[in-house]
Amino acid sequence: MKDNPKAGRKEIAEIIEDITEDGIKYHLEKLKAEGKLKRVGPAKGGYWVIIKTD
């Protein structure tokens, strides 16, 4: 996401390989709830912003 903030769940799952799109969705929602990640804009054409890193 840092290298490609416009990546969607499908693209992220293809890059990681060992996780499904549903798994990606779960983890993205978890990161958003923790305040570490934010989606800016619409589902198509939007991008991810990393708010906090550990």
Image (cartoon, rainbow, N blue to C red):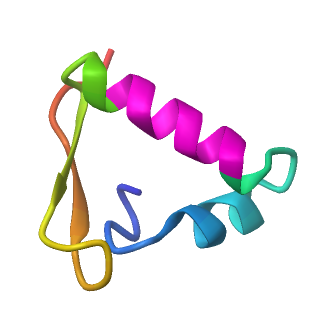
For residue 41, above or below residue 16: below
Horizontal side of 13 relative to 51 (left or right) equals right
For residue 36, above or below residue 21: above
The number of callouts visible is 0
Q: Quadrant of residue 53?
A: top left
Please identify the quadrant where the N terminus is shown: bottom left
Tell me residue 20's x, y (percent): 79, 50
Horizontal side of 31 relative to 27 (left or right) equals left
Q: Quadrant of residue 39?
A: bottom left
Q: Residue at x 70, y 59 (%)?
A: 13
Region in magenta: 22-31
For residue 19, above or below residue 40: above
Q: Quadrant of residue 33?
A: top left
Q: Nearer the viewer, residue 50 or 8?
A: 8
Q: Residue at x 37, y 27 (%)?
A: 31
Tell me residue 54's x, y (percent): 33, 14
Horizontal side of 53 relative to 40 (left or right) equals right
Magenta stretch: helix, strand or loop mostly: helix
Q: Residue at x 84, y 56 (%)?
A: 17
> Residue 23 colored magenta?
yes
Tell me residue 26's x, y (percent): 56, 33
> Residue 29 colored magenta?
yes
Tell me residue 22's x, y (percent): 68, 46
